[in-house]
């Protein structure tokens, strides 16, 4: 008896705080996923880092032996200056001195990366004035970009997602949920093909040092707004049509970001995902729900009354064999 009461009380406690328990599981799952990623990256990349360190150490030692007139301190000072310049996108190599980082097309590419959530980090402002302007430009530009992307995605998703799903649902009688799932999968496949697979193949041809995997890696890192900066197109030696190439990449990244947001919004509108997301949200109070229902009923009633009035007007306008008589004609008929 006591066990059954304790069990029922535990069940009621869990049901009353179901959202909090689901949220706690979500936080725990996210932390475990972070730890899992750290373990995998460490186990995969640490041996390569150790091998590279040993190789650089041997190369440095061989260079000092071949150039006895140069001390290790002088070499390290030179390398520190070279690495510092490299962090600002300036290289001392002879095959990289022909590309300027702050011409118009490169600056346009930099501005697009600043305003978007991605940031490659291969080019950064050198002067204090440039850094100050970058802060002000970003404070104004990032909300402006979010507003722009929201408005564009809201308009596109009406024609790309909602109307096609509604058309197949009304025209052919298919289930709206099934049509929405199929449509989301097809739209995702088209987006992956047009903005990942095909551009990756193009980048693998245009970039001399990139294979298909590295090109696909760049497309995914860029369009997912990660932007690590280890792969940046258009930075090769003697890149043909570099200005036009940079402008094309800027347009590709902007259109690809919009396409990704449209696909994400399409999947977020699926009924199953909406139900799944509600498991982790805070439930509304009953008073808020009642107010929302009353407001919805008032809006519905007003819209129904407006529709009824418009239908009456349409019926009057479409009534056959009815001719409107003017007041003067009525008066004359009465006088006769």
Image (cartoon, rainbow, N blue to C red):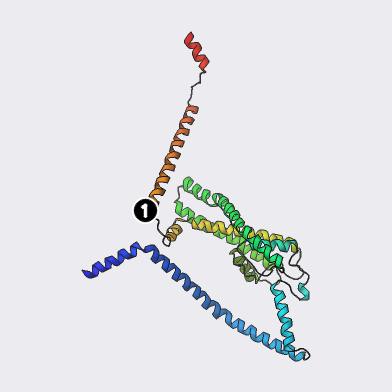
Rendering coords of residue 163 (x, y %): 52, 48
- Seen at 42% across and 68% down, the residue is 24
Q: Residue 166 location, x and y as percent?
A: 49, 48
Figure check: 264 above or below 317 = below
- Viewer-nearest residue: 146 or 307: 146
> Image quadrant for the N terminus?
bottom left
Q: Residue furthest top?
A: 336
Q: Which of the 4 quarters of the picture holds residue 149?
A: bottom right
Quick one: 334 or 210, which is closer to the camera? 334
Counting other residues with Cα less than 10 Å from the Cα at mark 1, is it few (<14), some (14-19), or many (20 or more)?
few
Q: Position of residue 317 (x, y in %)?
A: 50, 28
- Secondary structure at badge 1 equals helix
Q: Is residue 157 above or below residue 244?
A: above
Q: Is residue 79 left or right of residue 3?
A: right
* Name of the residue lying farthest toward the left: 1
The residue under label 1 is 286
Q: Position of residue 67 (x, y in %)?
A: 77, 89
Instruction: Say above or below: 28 vs 283.
Output: below
Residue at (32, 65) in percent of width and height: 13
């Amino acid at each position: 008896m006591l066990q059954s009461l304790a069990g029922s009380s535990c069940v009621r406690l869990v049901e009353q705080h179901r959202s909090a328990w689901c949220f706690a599981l979500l936080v725990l799952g996210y932390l475990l996923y972070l730890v899992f990623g750290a373990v995998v990256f460490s186990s995969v990349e640490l041996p390569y880092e150790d091998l590279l360190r040993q190789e650089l150490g041997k190369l440095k030692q061989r260079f000092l032996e071949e150039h006895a007139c140069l001390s290790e301190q002088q070499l390290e000072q030179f390398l520190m200056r070279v690495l510092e310049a490299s962090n600002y996108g300036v290289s001392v190599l002879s095959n990289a001195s022909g590309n300027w980082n702050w011409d118009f097309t490169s600056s346009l590419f930099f501005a697009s990366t600043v305003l978007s959530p991605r940031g490659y980090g291969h080019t950064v402002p050198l002067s204090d004035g440039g850094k100050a302007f970058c802060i002000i430009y970003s404070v104004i530009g990032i909300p402006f970009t979010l507003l722009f992307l929201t408005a564009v995605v809201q308009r596109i998703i009406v024609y790309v997602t909602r109307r096609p799903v509604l058309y197949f649902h009304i025209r052919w009688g298919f289930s709206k949920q099934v049509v929405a799932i199929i449509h989301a999968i097809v739209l995702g496949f088209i987006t992956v093909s047009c903005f990942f697979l095909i551009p990756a193949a193009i980048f693998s041809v245009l970039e001399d040092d990139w294979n298909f995997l590295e090109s696909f890696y760049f497309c995914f890192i860029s369009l997912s707004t990660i932007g690590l900066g280890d792969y940046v197109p258009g930075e090769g030696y003697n890149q043909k049509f570099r200005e036009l190439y940079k402008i094309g990449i800027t347009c590709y990244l902007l259109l690809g970001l919009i396409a990704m947001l449209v696909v994400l919004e399409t999947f977020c509108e699926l009924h199953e995902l909406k139900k799944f997301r509600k498991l982790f949200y805070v439930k509304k109070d009953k008073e808020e729900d009642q107010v929302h229902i009353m407001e919805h009923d008032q809006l519905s009633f007003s819209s129904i009354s407006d529709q009824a009035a418009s239908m009456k007007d349409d019926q009057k306008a479409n009534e056959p064999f009815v001719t409107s008589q003017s007041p003067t004609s009525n008066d004359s008929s009465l006088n006769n």
